[in-house]
Image: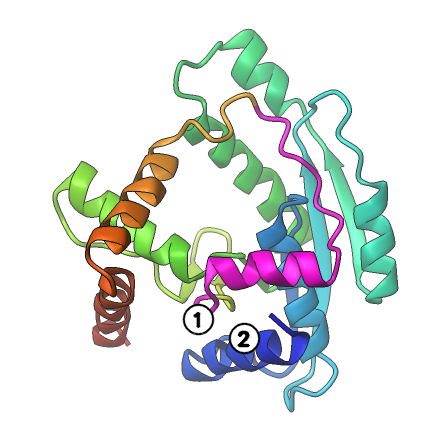
Amino acid sequence: MQLKRLLSLTRKAVDEYNMIEDGDKIAIGISGGKDSLTLLYALSGLRRFYPKHFELEAITVNMGFEGFDTSALSELCKSLNVHYTVIDTEIKQVVFDIRKEDNPCSLCAKMRKGAFNDKAKELGCNKEAYAHHKDDAIETSLMSLIYEGHYYCYAPVTYLDRMDITLIRPLLFVDECDVVGFKNLYSLPVVKNPCPADGFTKREYIKNLIKDLEKNTPGVRDRLFHAVKEYWDTKK
C-alpha cells in the first residue's frame, strides 16, 4: 500500500467519525509493531495538510523485557518530526515474575494503558490514537459473540471521563494485509514483541478462524465488517 492510499483511508475515518478537532494534541502508543508504526506515518502525514491543526506525541511503554531496543523507533520519530518519549516500567516483573499470571494479557494491557494514559496527560494530550485496523474490529466483534454471548465492538471515538481524554482509531478502514504491505514497502523498523504470550491468545485463535471462514465462504470478512460498521453507525 502506498502512503497516498494510507492517508486517504485515514482521512476517511477521521472525517466520518469527527476524530480530530482544531488544536488537538494526540498521543500515539508506539509498541514497535507494524500497526502502531503505520499509524504514526498516517497521522504525521495527515498533519501536513489536514485543515484542522493538531500536534502529535509518540509514546512507548517499555515493559522491562531484556533486549527491547527503541533506538530505531526514536530515529523514525525524529525523521517524521514527532516528539518521542519512552516510559520505563516493571510490568514484565510484576506480571510474569511476581504474580506469575497464567493469563497475563488482561493485567498487562491494564498496566500498559495506565502508564500510557498518565504520560499522555502529563504531556498535555487531550486525545490518544490507537492503531486498531479493520481486521482488529472484525475480530473484536466475533470474540464478543463467541466468548461473551453478545454483539459488541469498540467505538471509533470513545471519551474516557475518568481520564478526561478521548480515544480515536484512525485506521479502522485499513486492512491488515495493507498494513503489512505498507510496512514492507516503507521498511518500517518493526521491533519484535518480546512477550512470551505473543501469538498464543484468544485473538490469534479468532484471527485464524476468520481466515478459515473466508477460505470456505469468500466475502465473509467484508460482510462481518459491514455488520461492525452498521453497529457503529447506530451508535452515532
| x then y, percent, for residue 177 | 50, 59
> Which label sits on residue 216?
none
Residue at image point 63% right, 63% down: 182
Residue at image point 39% right, 37% down: 204
Callout 1 amino acid: Phe
Q: Which residues are magenta?
A: 172-195
Q: Could you say which quadrant of the image residue 54 lies in? A: bottom right
Q: Which residue is mark 2?
A: 10
Residue 125 visible in this rendered orientation of the protein: no
Q: Is residue 3 left or right of residue 142?
A: right
Residue 37 visible in this rendered orientation of the protein: yes
Furthest-front residue in view?
A: 216
Q: Quadrant of the N terminus?
A: bottom right
Q: Which residue is mark 1?
A: 173
Task: Work out whether residue 47 or residue 218 is closer to the camera in this orientation and state it.
Answer: 218
User: Does the segment drawn in magenta span residue 6?
Assistant: no
Residue at image point 40% right, 14% down: 102
Q: Secondary structure at mark 2?
A: helix
The Cα–Cα distance between marks 1 and 2, rounded to whole angstroms, is 7 Å
The tag earlier along the polypeptide, 1 or 2, is: 2
Q: Is residue 71 left or right of residue 18?
A: right
Question: Around disc 2, counting alpha carbons within 10 Å, would you say few (fewer than 14), some (14 to 19), or many (20 or more)?
Answer: many
| x then y, percent, for residue 70 | 80, 40
Furthest-bottom residue in view?
A: 51
Check contact, mark 1 vs mark 2: CB within 8 A: yes
User: Relative to 229, is 203 above or below?
Assistant: above
Here the colouring is rainbow
